[in-house]
Image (tube, helix red, strand yellow):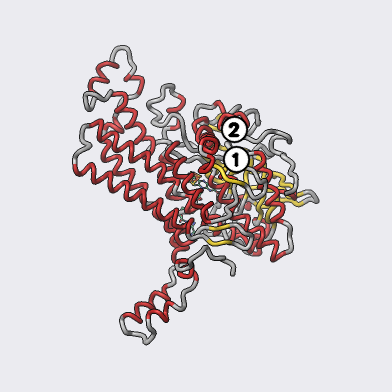
Amino acid sequence: MATVKDDARGSQQAPIRTGAEYIESLRGRDLTIYLLGERVDEPVDHPVIRPSINAVAKTYDLAVEDPELGGAVSPYTGGRINRFLHIATSPEDLVMQNKMQRRLGQLTGTCFQRCVGMDAFNSLHSVTFEIDEAHDTGYHERFVDFVGMTQQNGYVVGGAMTDVKGDRSKAPHEQDDPDMFVHVTRRTEEGVYVRGAKAHQTGCINSHWMIIMPTLRLGESDRDFAIVGAVPVDAEGITYIYGRQSCDTRAMEGGDIDAGNAKFSGQEAMVIFDDVFIPNERIFMDGEFEFAAMLVERFTCYHRRSYVCKSGVGDALIGAAAAIADYNGVERASHIRDKLVEMTHLNETIYSTGIAASYQASQMKSGVYMSDDMIANVCKHHVTKMPYEIGRLAQDLAGGLMVTAPSQKELDHPEIGETVRKYLKGRTEVSAEDRVRVLRLIENMTMGRNAVGYLTESMHGAGSPQAQRIQIARQMQLDFKKALAKSLAGISDEAADEVSGDLADYMAKVFSPVAPSCDE
Ligand SMILES: Cc1cc2nc3c(=O)[nH]c(=O)nc-3n(C[C@H](O)[C@H](O)[C@H](O)COP(=O)(O)OP(=O)(O)OC[C@H]3O[C@@H](n4cnc5c(N)ncnc54)[C@H](O)[C@@H]3O)c2cc1C
Ligand code: SF4
């Protein structure tokens, strides 16, 4: 592999391995960040931002503590790297991504932010290869070089796909303001300048690099919007507008009960690109508009099954619901048990479809493996519904105190504290504080900070529900299914096994004994 220049942190640094090293790597970057109307000098020390950094730090610590789960061996560097930077060389690699995601959901109870970059890496591996094939460009080698550089340094890479989009009924070139979609404003011998804004960017401030990608299918008039490139998070011209999360300022009040999950949170921000330069060696698509749809579809194919992360978060929420039932003295009631069974059933349904999409993978021309698109979309579509039902059942078991409990300041108050604790008791042997802590956690996950990740991100992240229905509709093979029915009902003369002889597309993957190649 070519030697790569590390232009995000200066060359010759040791790779980032542990969570603590990662947190240190974020210091002193002089990013332009606005939060609650103020410039943030050092995000690492900001009480609202720090829990989101802690969540990413867990992805490093897991790779150290459980290298099989959190790490992988890179075909590019030959060394052990963080799994979030790995290009999938087999279906098992994809399955291991899902297992890692579930584990990290359990450990953090929130979004740990690194999957968008991981899924962008894997989709760009095949797309850059196929653009080169069609246009005789050199994107794939550049891209692989970039991947190797991030692996050597142990970086966090964010994926910036979603544009702010303006009027949703108009294509990028039709917008009154072209900045509604990130686009190239100027080209020089050395590279391009881009302008526009990306919305809802997960973990962007906690990343070292961001990959900018188009967000939808593009036509010839959208050529300048067909840009894919990598920029360091601290590149000149970038401004971050931090997204508010429900109850986020509880992190600024002191104490650790009211926040619900004081250690971990997700992070989203709007990223504004004001003529940001991307050098040629970091450009992976420029003008090949006909490949934008392929990139979006392949990215979402990986990302929609990455949402098994929610099954890990769901494990923690089911645990919280079981704990509060126990603290309230009702854990043996049959309807409580039944609701915990229902929550588990829903949670495992999410996990099952995600992992099935990974198992039913195909090898692309570039050599990377890609998950199954139909099942990945089914997984994500479940995720737009099931966490809401799991959350509803958790709130049922929690009781009303989840939303009426007094603050930690009353619990700790020198005059009223003892009385408050007396009346907040459930079972005698459980402290009032523990009871409130678990209620606050359920509040946090179903209507507080981490409901952003558990609920609304489940709805819209990787595309709103209709986007999955479109993909499912494309692949449902109704003619094939009608032919089966007509054969069995005696309407057609064709025997059912003759109909099956036409197995193609999705069905071909279902019955393929080994991971097939998509492109054959
Ligand atoms: C917490 C969170 C984290 C995220 N993280 C990332 C990230 O890291 N990187 C990233 O790139 N993106 C990220 N996203 C963005 C996510 O992919 C988008 O939210 C999603 O694609 C929906 O886009 P939107 O939010 O602009 O909603 P909108 O486009 O405004 O959609 C709202 C509704 O309008 C419908 N709609 C939209 N356009 C049309 C149309 N043309 N015709 C008919 N109906 C339409 C939708 O189906 C939906 O029901 C994140 C989102 C969330 C909520
Ligand atoms: S929502 Fe889940 S898949 Fe997306 S970045 Fe967060 S943890 Fe990963």
Please name the amino acid that badge 2 sits on: Tyr
Q: Nearer the viewer, residue 246 or 388?
A: 388
Where residue 31 sits, quadrant-wise, is top right
Which residue corresponds to mark 1? 156
Labelled pair 1, 2 in contact (Cβ < 8 Å)? yes
Label at residue 4: none
Q: Seen from this angle, which residue lies furthest top?
A: 414
Which residue corresponds to mark 2? 22
Q: Nearer the viewer, residue 410 or 491?
A: 491
Q: Seen from this angle, which residue lies furthest right?
A: 189
Residue 337 rendering spot, x and y as whole percentages: 23, 43
Quadrant (top left, top right, bottom left, bottom right) of the C terminus: bottom right
Residue 508 can be seen in this image? yes
Residue 306 rendering spot, x and y as whole percentages: 48, 50
How packed mark 1 is, by other alpha carbons closer than 10 Å (few <14, some 14-19, many 20 or more), is: many
Q: Secondary structure at mark 1?
A: loop
How packed mark 2 is, by other alpha carbons closer than 10 Å (few <14, some 14-19, many 20 or more), is: many
Residue 356 rendering spot, x and y as whole percentages: 44, 57
Mark 1 within 8 Å of ligand 2, using the beta carbon: no
Q: Is residue 464 above or below residue 59?
A: below
Tell me the residue at 23%/31% (across/down).
Answer: 328
Q: Earlier in the sequence, mark 1 or mark 2?
A: 2
Q: Nearer the viewer, residue 504 or 310?
A: 504
Tell me the residue at 66%/39% (across/down).
Answer: 153
Tell me the residue at 40%/40% (across/down).
Answer: 451
Distance Cα–Cα, label 1 vs label 2: 9 Å
Please name the amino acid that badge 1 sits on: Val
Q: Secondary structure at mark 2?
A: helix
